[in-house]
Amino acid sequence: MSRPVATALLAVVMVATIVAVDIVVFRHHFWPRLAANVGIVLIFGALYYRFVHH
């Protein structure tokens, strides 16, 4: 898989994960939702640097 395709796929999966967690778990809780979103972005950033970035 080429780098642009892998990056785009990772970004789409990250956005879908953030939206799903926001809707299902943290609908009415601002600060836990913000913390979870930051954590999700950090995890996907680590995955990007581990597997996609050379």
Image: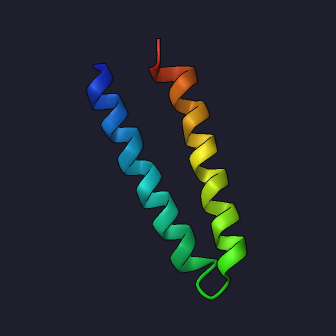
Q: Residue at x 27, y 30 (%)?
A: 5
View extreme (top): residue: 54
Residue 10 lies in quadrant: top left
Q: Could you tell me which residue is drawn at 28 percent across and 27 percent down? A: 4
Query: Quadrant where the N terminus lies?
Result: top left
Name the colour scheme: rainbow
Q: Nearer the viewer, residue 18 or 38?
A: 38
Residue in the picture at 64% in, 71% down = 33
Residue 23 location, x and y as percent?
A: 52, 78
Question: What residue is shown at x 35% (from left), y 30% (from top)?
Answer: 6
Residue 52 relative to residue 47: left or right = left
Q: Horizontal placement of 45 versus 14: left or right?
A: right
Determine whether 6 is above or below 30 in the image.
above
- Residue 6 drawn above or below residue 36: above
Depicted 2 relative to depicted 31: above or below: above
Q: Is residue 52 left or right of 21 when viewed as pictured?
A: left
**Residue 54 in picture, x, y percent from top left:** 47, 11
Q: Viewed as shown, does residue 54 lie left or right of 33?
A: left
Could you tell me residue 47's position as x and y percent? 56, 32
Image mark count: 0
- Where is residue 52? Give x, y as percent: 45, 22
In this view, which residue lies farthest toward the bottom? 28
